[in-house]
Image (cartoon, rainbow, N blue to C red):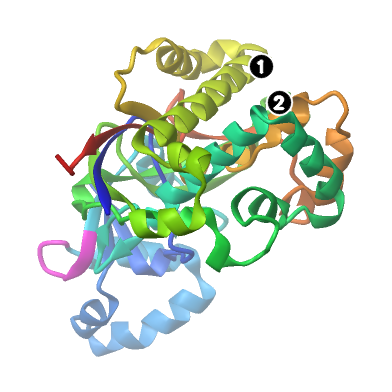
Amino acid sequence: MKTYKLECKILSPVHIGDGTEIYPYEYIIKQGKFYKIELENFLQQLSQNEQNKFPSLVENNIIQLREFLVESFNPDKHSFDYCVDVSNNVASLYTTKINDELNQLIVKPFIKTKNTPYIPGSSIKGAIRTAIAYYLLKHNQNLMNTLKKELWSKARTIIDKLIFQNNDFGTNNDKLRVLLVSDSSLLSTNSLKIEVIQRLASKPQKQSRSALLGFKIYCETLKKDTTITSEILINDKLSDKLLDSSWKQLLSKEGVIKCCLEFSKDLIDLELEYFNNHPEKDKLKGIIEFYEHLKNKKLDDSCFFLSLGQGGGFYQKTIAMLLEKDKDFRYKEFIKKFGRKNQGKKLTATSRSIVVDNQNYYVLGWLECRLKDLNN
């Protein structure tokens, strides 16, 4: 095995969910802190009358339930699974709108093991995989032409089959079996913060005259400046079996960095174009400055950017940038047919997910990474 240490610094809030949700009866927010209640312990310390009352509140009256929790839960007295910070917006919504029956504030937790957050190796490897596919297609017109022909009938499988599996669909032949990525080091819950995430559309909405869509989601995110470590390993024996010389170069330390840098560079340029042409550009100066900083930052030979998790959007996890710019490809028609669905509607790439805190806006999911050789 060739072994590399991957060190990453969080540049903007990162959310990688575990597929569950935390409901209002499972937590309390007090003094800027979110407490995930250890429900069984909490209920045991209530009076019999309160215990009898609790199920009815959970089922029938969200307003009274939240008032009951605020009055009853004491972090100095009751056990809780973990505690994390909340943004000003989340704290304000929780306290000022507690009597709003629609303000349920269902929270999407960050992935954890035993209440300890981490970034899965699969998320990092998935981002690298997308970057490699993008790089190969951008620099091989014959490969790109084949992809465009077959996408219409095999949209869900063609990238894997054409690029990574030698046209023989199956994981045993997947070239990226050679590359292994470990889960990150375990992180403290102090590195988490619950943020309000909203959709930003390309034009103002008729109802509110704002491009911010009405619905909000509440997510545990890794805070900016958090650092994580992981390992990337290259299986030399499997490499000799599955890879030719060009692929061996591509899956070297230098090759992975080159692919990730080119993909992130094009993605940053695209996002700058989107936000610079947005009708509410003046409100989004912080986001524009963030992307300009990434664009102009000088990185040494071991560094690159990655975009992970919730909010990176359609372009982050696909090769859509190449298809959209290709004059011979019917991109809008393709998206209309195969685009990801949300709440029954087809999603195009005309909106973004952003963090909203007071009147400040932030993008999600960017990391600065450094790859160090551990074989020497």
Q: Give coordinates of residue 347: x percent, y percent.
A: 74, 44
Q: Give coordinates of residue 90: x percent, y percent.
A: 40, 43
Q: Please say whether residue 79 is one of the residues in the magenta stretch.
A: yes
SS class of the residue under badge 1? loop
Residue stretch in magenta: 75-82
Question: For the view shown, which residue lies furthest in the left direction?
Answer: 76
Look at mark 1 in the image and give the residue it sits on: 278
Q: Nearer the viewer, residue 344 or 123?
A: 123
Q: Quadrant of residue 266?
A: top right
- Mark 2 and mark 1: Cα distance apart in space: 6 Å
Q: Residue at x 30, y 56 (%)?
A: 183
Question: Is 310 rendered above or below residue 60?
Answer: above
Q: Please say whether residue 291 is one of the residues in the magenta stretch.
A: no
Q: Nearer the viewer, residue 302 or 178?
A: 178
Instruction: Say whether residue 347 is left or right of residue 173.
Output: right
Given contact means CB atoms under 8 Å apart, are the residues at marks 2 and 1 in contact? yes
Q: Give coordinates of residue 371: x percent, y percent.
A: 28, 35
Query: Which numbered disc covers residue 202?
Result: 2
Question: Is 210 rendered above or below residue 348?
Answer: above
Residue type at mark 2 is Ser
Q: Residues within 10 Å of mark 1 (few under 14, many from 20)?
A: some
Mark 2 vs 1, N-terminal side: 2
SS class of the residue under badge 2? loop
Q: Residue at x 57, y 56 (%)?
A: 102
Question: Is 230 rendered above or below residue 356?
Answer: below
Instruction: Say whether residue 169 is left or right of residue 329.
Output: left
